[in-house]
Amino acid sequence: MDTNIVSSSADVMGGTPVFSGTRVPIQTFLDYIEAGETMDEFLEGFPSVTRKQVIAFLEEAKRIRPV
């Protein structure tokens, strides 16, 4: 995964993968989507994450595991 999209450091959230430059775990976004929430609802709840970051994450995830 591109380090500009996701980062993981023992100093931030104990090494949990987060959106780079934030303390928002990637898993939180996945939980929102799994629960039927929209990307916009996620972004409203976590304003430190940008739309560009979420789209880049989804594009990278699709590249790694095609639908």
Image (cartoon, grey):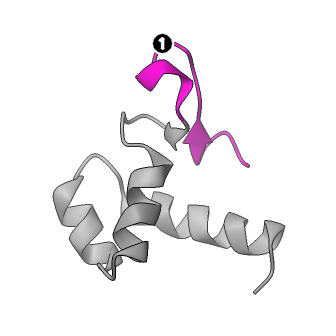
Residue 46 inside the magenta-drawn segment: no
Residue 30: x %, y % from top left: 46, 63
Instruction: Name the magenta segment's main secondary structure.
Output: loop
Farthest residue, direction front: 35
Using a 10 Å C-alpha cutoff, classify the residue at mark 1 as few (fewer than 14 neighbours), some (14 to 19) or many (20 or more): few
**Left or right: where does residue 55 sit relative to residue 3?**
left
Q: Identify whether 32 is placed above or below 4.
A: below
Report x, y in % for residue 43. Answer: 27, 63
Residue at 52% of width from left, 32% of height from top?
16
Residue sticking out furthest to the top: 11
Residue 47 lies, in percent from the top left, at: 22, 52
User: On the image, numbered disc 1 is attached to which residue?
Assistant: 11
| Vertical comparison of 65 with 28: above or below | below
Q: Residue at x 72, y 75 (%)?
A: 62
Say which quarter of the image contains residue 40: bottom left
Residue 51 placement: quadrant: bottom left
Kindly state the secondary structure of the residue where label 1 is placed. loop
The correct choice, above or below, for 32 with respect to 22 in the image is below
What is the x, y in percent for residue 19?
Answer: 47, 44
Q: Is residue 9 magenta?
A: yes
Q: Nearer the viewer, residue 36 or 5?
A: 36
Mark 1 residue type? Asp
Q: Quadrant of the C terminus?
A: bottom right
Q: Which residues are magenta?
A: 1-16
58 left or right of 35 in image: right
- Name the residue furthest left: 44
